[in-house]
Image: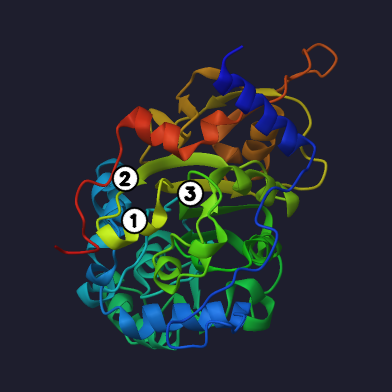
Amino acid sequence: MSRINMKCIDLALRVLEGRQTFLRSPVLLHNKKMNHSRLATSEGVQENVKKYYGSRLESSCDLQTSAASGSLSCSRCSLPPSVTEALSLVHPEVTKRFFGCGLPFPGKLKGCRLLDLGSGSGRDCFAFSKLVGPSGHVTGIDMTEELVSASRQHIGYHQRQFGYEEPNVTFVQGYMEELEEAGIQRNSMDVLISNCVICLCPDKKAVLQQAYNALKEGGEFTFSDMYASRVVPDHMKQDPVLWGEGMGGALFWEDLISLARSVGFSTPLLVSASLIEVHNKDLAARTGDIRYASSTYRLFKLPERSVGSSATVTYKGTEAEAPDRLDFDSSHRFEKGVAMRVNAEMAAILQNSRFAEDFKIEMLDNHESKPEPAPQLCHLNPFLLAEKRGSSVKQCSKTCK
């Protein structure tokens, strides 16, 4: 048996056994202006990020990696026309201060209640405002006062741009780890999105748990983030610039799988991935042999005991921008009218999510079907997907050099 298959099987067993391999302790952070002996709490990490993104960075050009350009160059060619149009209508000043690393735009959003975790300048929120339509609503939450204030100043502009009688966007200041304290009720959202901010949070489990709590049953959390090729060592977590760039706090991609499942989510579905190039020589030297990827995953909140048997599903071709084929993620491409067998978890996702009406679903009899083998999870590796597709960020829009 090959080495890579052994690794896949080991990873699958760890997930099935529920062994949580995610970071087990709060990160430490020091500021060069502070006493290096001072232990940094989660609040200290958050304050550093506020300063880095609220005051220090005036535009995405001030960042030191190519991550943001991945969201603009690598993915746009595959975007549906509605998303391309929505992004083109966003105010230039909002786009200028966009610090994301991907394009977490799931389909079928009309009328949805959507929450953007770490909304920053509001670029994605305003684009989603167009996509959910006047009957939907978008809430953006960010801990940085400067960015929240700047976002609110552009609400009226986008309301007029989209021709809405009333604005359908709200921005609140608060923490992703404390959504309820910010006024986000449990079971109130259809879709959550996030764009390259979880890597900036010290308590990633708290973020995912709060996201899970905010979603309705059948709801979806789609997010882009930076991931590391291995566990990031402590000395990198203590570097304020590496943390601000997302590299110090990037999660080892394998840890996301057990972390997501530990709070109740379905197994993450990998949508897209691009390798990130670090153009700043000093930062590249500090990161050593660790590689980084910008990746988008989809997670679903399924009703309890909803995962039953595998199924045969047939896409009806009912999505306007996907009449012939629906690319659900990098492993599931549904052709119109073609029956396809899916495992029990994917069957539960299609049956319980907003996509249920787009599929004919025939559950297979457990007594007649063979037991499903333990899943091999290497298809969730963003580095393998990026290398397979030859996807890397060639141009640096963050350094602007």
Q: Secondary structure at mark 3?
A: strand
Q: Label 2 is placed on what type of residue?
A: Pro
C-alpha gap between disc 2 and disc 3: 29 Å
Q: Are marks 1 and 3 in contact (CB under 8 Å)?
A: no
Is 278 placed left or right of 394 in the picture?
A: right
Residue farthest toward the right in the current orientation of the protein: 367
Is residue 137 shown above or below 108?
below
Looking at the rendered image, the quarter that the C terminus falls into is bottom left
Q: Position of residue 77 (x, y in %)?
A: 24, 43
**34 shown above or below 86:** below
Tag 1's secondary structure? helix
Mark 2 or mark 1, which has the lower sequence index?
2
Say which of marks 2 and 1 sits in front. 1
Mark 1: few/some/many CA within 10 Å (<14, 14-19, 20+): few
Q: Residue furthest left?
A: 401
Q: Between tags 2 and 3, which lies in front?
A: 3
Three-letter residue code for mark 3? Ala
Q: Which residue is mark 1?
A: 285
User: What residue is drawn where x is 40% and y is 55%?
Assistant: 287
Q: Amino acid at mark 1?
A: Ala
Depth check, front residue: 236 or 172: 236
Determine whether label 2 and label 3 are within 8 Å by CB: no
Which residue was labeled with disc 3? 228
Closer to the camera: disc 1 or disc 3?
A: 1
**Residue 202 visible to an observer of this rendering:** yes
Whether 122 is drawn above or below 368: the answer is: below
